[in-house]
Amino acid sequence: MKSLVKSLLLIALPICAAVLLVIAAEKFGGRQESESLKQLESTVRKAVMTCYATEGVYPPTVDYIEKRYGLQIDHTRYNVFYEIFGDNIMPQITVLELAEDDS
């Protein structure tokens, strides 16, 4: 009976450890994605402010910032929404991660 319990423990412990590692990796990956979104949004805002400081106007589009200020956006992963309200009003910037295609 004791050898059966020991055998089960020897099998169960590595499986439990593997499951815990997978759960931890998923949580870390989610946190990392959230941080990437924040970082990209911050980078876009800095590029917008640089354009405003340099040219005296906010950039008309995100494409403009990419071409003139070297901003790089992975358009396969992120969608950047850029809405202008007026010449001297900071545009609204929203960055969203695109949904992964399961196919």
Image (cartoon, helix red, strand yellow):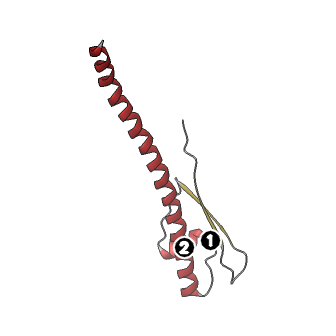
The quadrant of the rendering that contains the N terminus is: top left
State yes or no: discs 2 and 1 in contact (Cβ < 8 Å): yes
Q: Is residue 72 above or below residue 101?
A: below
Tell me the residue at 46%/55% (across/down): 32
Outermost right residue:
85
**Number of other residues with Cα within 10 Å of mark 2, as a class: few under 14, some 14 to 19, many 20 or more:** some
Left or right: 51 with respect to 83?
Answer: left
Residue drawn at point x = 49 percent, y = 70 percent: 71
Residue at left offset 36%, top offset 35%: 17
Can residue 45 be seen from the camera position used here? Answer: yes
* Label 2, label 1: how far apart the Cα atoms are: 7 Å
Q: Nearer the viewer, residue 64 or 56?
A: 56
Instruction: Say which quadrant the C terminus sits in.
Output: top right
Residue 100 locus on image (x, y percent) = 54, 44
Decide which of 98, 60 is in the foreground and name it. Answer: 98
86 relative to 41, above or below: below
Above or below 10: residue 94: below
Q: Which residue is mark 2?
A: 65
Disc 1: which residue: 61
Counting from the top left corner in percent of width and height, residue 97 is at: 56, 54
Badge 1: few (under 14), some or many (20 or more) residues near its Cα, within 10 Å? some
Note whether 69 is above or below 39 in the view shown: below
Q: Is residue 69 left or right of residue 52?
A: left
Total marks shown come to: 2
| Residue in the picture at 32% in, 30% down | 14
* Element assignment for label 2: helix
Q: Position of residue 11 (x, y in %)?
A: 32, 23
